[in-house]
Amino acid sequence: MIEDKLTTFAELGLAPAIHQVIDEVGYETPSPIQAQSIPPLLAGRDLLGQAQTGTGKTAAFALPLLSRLDLKKKSPQILVLTPTRELALQVAEAIRTYSRHLPGFQVLPIYGGQSMSQQLRQLHRGVHAVVGTPGRIQDHLRRGTLNLGDLAAVVLDEADEMLRMGFVEDVEEILKETPAGRQTALFSATMPKEVLNIARRYMRDPVEIRIKAKTSTVETIVQRFWQVKGLHKLDALTRILEAEDIEGMLVFVRTKTATVELSEKLESRGFSCAPLNGDMTQAMREKTVEQLKSGALDIVVATDVAARGLDVKRISHVVNYDIPYDTEAYVHRIGRTGRAGREGQAILFVAPRERRMLAAIERATRQPITAMSLPSRKEISNRRIGLFKEQIAEAMESQDLEFYEELIDSYQHQYDVGLRRLAATLAYLVQKDKPLQFAEGGGEEPEGLEEDESPFVGRAPVARDGNLMRYRVEVGRIHGVEPKHIVGAIANEANIKSRDIGQIKIYDDHCLVDLPQTMPSATFRHLQKVWICGQQLQISPADDRFPTRAARAKSKPGAKSGEGKFFKPTGKKSPRNRHGGRKSS
């Protein structure tokens, strides 16, 4: 049996325009933090929420605050402070989605590394919500370009992370600039003393909410993830379906619409598939589950609520086609396999910007999720050929073929065709709708860069003047960094052209980057304070054992040690620190 849903967004009293968006995107039930946070925030109460990353906090504060918005005012009414620029962009994108039926609504992400003039133009035009990092928000407050006089609500997202990164003074200075009557919401994974002190000083009788995420997963479930790159997710899922030994599969997506769309696409590719969502009647849902149990269906594409309580021993694989919004949902999803002591397979599709959620899931489950490589075209072709041979052998053993043998003899005699040619033609007719090989000339499609490579790997690590030196930065694979993050940050913050950045090697907790040896000392010191993926670069010259070939060739005995050994001031004026000498955020 499948449990009926208990709480819906319709019961939370959100504004009609906000609820319309929820219906359109197909969200069905709120997560625990959303169900508990939305009512008090709608009522104007301050809120202190403790919940892990990935529990759906953004919607928990965005939906009620947008419902209370006064669109007639063109000044900031909502301010969201985040510890990193990546999170600021994610929150701003979510708010933009939730507000698409609010006429004239504008949200502006503000963070270091972005053009100040662009931010000034947008602020001048008027915005209703600002999402930013403390450093850049402080810059605008000092310049007088950000007016918080009409602010109705301020949100501190991942407050403990902001404090850990040294933003406690900035946060307090910003809060002092906000109106005394504003509403305040603070969300934090932990509640250290500093966070509680801020809550006591700047919040009025806050509602306290604590969400304990489930952390247990079945030991018989093998957990893997595929980083979305190169291939479309549908193509990746198709390869998995062809390569893995699958008995029954449950595919999770976020919305009701996606269940229908994905199941139709899989059916068109020859798979036995059906959707399962909350718009279906209970009878239809039960029928779909029974078909999965009996083997009439092999794949069911479902939303979280539709699959609640689903227990089908035949499910060998669970695929998180869309990453869940919270860790508790992930644990629930993969618990649909590995039943009755049988081994199950759980596969998670993760886009590059969702690596934070992957890390949160690993922390919550206390189990590693290993990276997987998709089977190549050649491997898929070999598997198709193997299955075709098995079908031939099985038919030879189990079927009476005398009539067909006579038919082949007659054709061969009439048209004088060799048996090899005739058999090949029949094989083509059988498999033409699902070829055993990929189309000619397709080759092995690129799936994007490996995590320890950069766009510059494979060419000589030499700048235009052949003068590079190797540096170490304190951000690595465990933080979700990619070459494009490093190239973008250094190009923007140090005014170094991307073509002048040499080889990048990514390791678990650090990276080695080849940069021009003539980098000014002021630029070097500025880069030490730059943040990428929530980590400060803390750039330093790499060990002498790892200079580039060009640098080794140019090095001379007796060179002085220290800073001058690794870069030479050019005498030119270095780029101005756009962050006012403060932490880059």
Image (cartoon, rainbow, N blue to C red):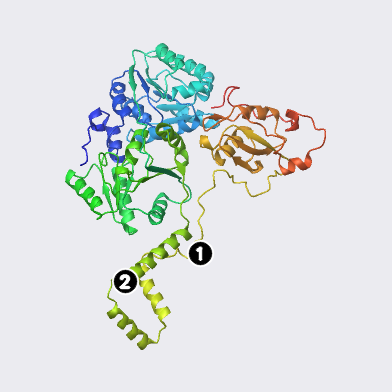
Q: Using the image as rendered, state which of residue 559 and residue 466 is in the foreground.
A: 559
Q: Residues within 10 Å of mark 2 (few under 14, many from 20)?
A: few
Residue 366 appears at what percent x and percent y? 42, 33
Residue at coordinates 46% horizontally, 20% vertically from top-left? 147
Q: Is residue 466 shown left or right of residue 261?
A: right
Q: Is residue 195 above or below residue 458?
A: above
Residue 99 falls in image quadrant = top left
The CA span between labels 1 and 2 is: 37 Å
Q: Is residue 330 above or below residue 422?
A: above
Residue at coordinates 71% horizontally, 41% vertically from top-left? 548
Residue 151 appears at what percent x and percent y? 40, 20
Q: Which residue is mark 2?
A: 397
Residue at coordinates 52% horizontally, 25% vertically from top-left? 136
Mark 1 vs mark 2: which is more N-terminal?
2
Q: Residues within 10 Å of mark 1 (few under 14, many from 20)?
A: few
Residue 535 appears at what percent x and percent y? 54, 30
Q: Is residue 582 shown left or right of residue 309?
A: right
Q: Is residue 76 visible?
A: no
Q: Using the image as rendered, state which of residue 180 and residue 253 is in the foreground.
A: 253
Q: Nearer the viewer, mark 1 or mark 2?
A: 2
Amino acid under label 2? Glu
Name, please, the residue furthest toward the front: 341
Q: How many marks?
A: 2
Residue 221 appears at what percent x and percent y? 37, 42
Amino acid under label 1? Gly
**Disc number at residue 557?**
none
Name, please, the residue furthest toward the left: 283
Q: Which element is circle 1 on?
A: loop
Q: Is residue 340 shown left or right of residue 514?
A: left
Q: Is residue 236 visible?
A: yes
Q: Which element is circle 2 on?
A: helix
**Disc number at residue 441?**
1
